[in-house]
Amino acid sequence: MEKRFVGFFSLLLSLASASVPNGGVGVELWCVAKNNAEDAALKTALDWACGAGGADCSPIQQSGPCYDPNDVQVTASFAFNDYYLKHGLTDDSCSFDNTAALTSLNPSHDKCKFPSSLSVSNGNGNFSGSIQDGGVGPSIISGCTQISWLWFWPLITGHVFVVLSRIISER
């Protein structure tokens, strides 16, 4: 039993030591289309993201590395992710009328590479991007999610470490 706890501690410590430039815990995230979203809703959100939302949709245009005219979910995922990376890395910037969600599973495939949340630092420890309003995208974007990552994972990791240490010491 003790060997399982040692393995678990190793995993927790490796998560805690993977840091992003601003001192938070490094968790790679991507914003992707939900697999249960209706195609019509995805197309509406995709049009907004590539238009008023300001996402770079050139990779999903014809002859681009992510172009797939038969899969609106993959196409929308690329646009949603680009918008998310450019607009604050918040839960609100990955909503698109509830057709998108954050994932830690890399959606990249073949030559279509999706940048992750860890690729967005602007060099001084802050995330780059701007806030835009309107359409089906987020209407209010705050930095609360970014701030919570600074304390949430270290707090949880520390708490789990203390609890498991007490369990092991009682045996």
Image (cartoon, helix red, strand yellow):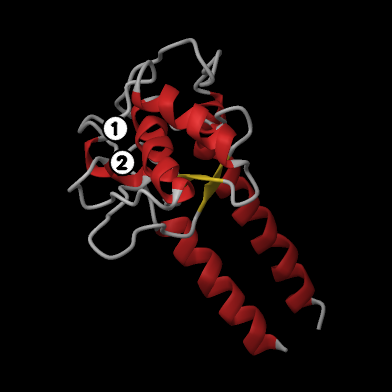
Q: Is residue 25 left or right of residue 79?
A: right
Q: Nearer the viewer, residue 6 or 25?
A: 25
Q: How many marks?
A: 2
Q: In the depicted view, which residue is nearer to us: 74 or 62?
A: 62
Label 1 – label 2 distance at C-alpha:
5 Å
Q: Residue at x 22, y 36 (%)?
A: 58
Looking at marks 1 and 2 on the same chain, the residue that comes earlier in the sequence is marked by 2
Q: Secondary structure at mark 1?
A: loop
> Viewer-proximal residue, 23 or 60?
60
Q: Residue at x 55, y 29 (%)?
A: 96
Q: Is residue 71 in sight in this rendering? A: yes
Q: Residue at x 35, y 26 (%)?
A: 50
Quadrant occupied by the N terminus = bottom right
Task: Identify residue type, mark 1.
Answer: Gly
Q: Position of residue 63 (x, y in %)?
A: 17, 48
Disc 2, SS: loop
Q: Which mark is residue 44?
A: none
Q: Position of residue 72 (x, y in %)?
A: 46, 45
Q: Amino acid at mark 2?
A: Pro
- Mark 2, other Cα within 10 Å: few <14 / some 14–19 / many ≥20: some
Name the spot of residue 102 as percent of width and height, x first.
Answer: 54, 45
Labelled disc at residue 21: 2
Position of 76 relative to 111 (above/below):
above
Would you place residue 40 above or below residue 1 in this image? above
Is there a contact, CB below 8 Å, between mark 1 and mark 2?
Answer: yes
**Residue 76 or 9: which is nearer the viewer?**
76
In this image, 129 relative to 95: left or right?
left
Farthest residue in the front direction? 70
Q: Which residue is mark 1?
A: 125
| Picture layout, residue 114 above or below residue 162 | above
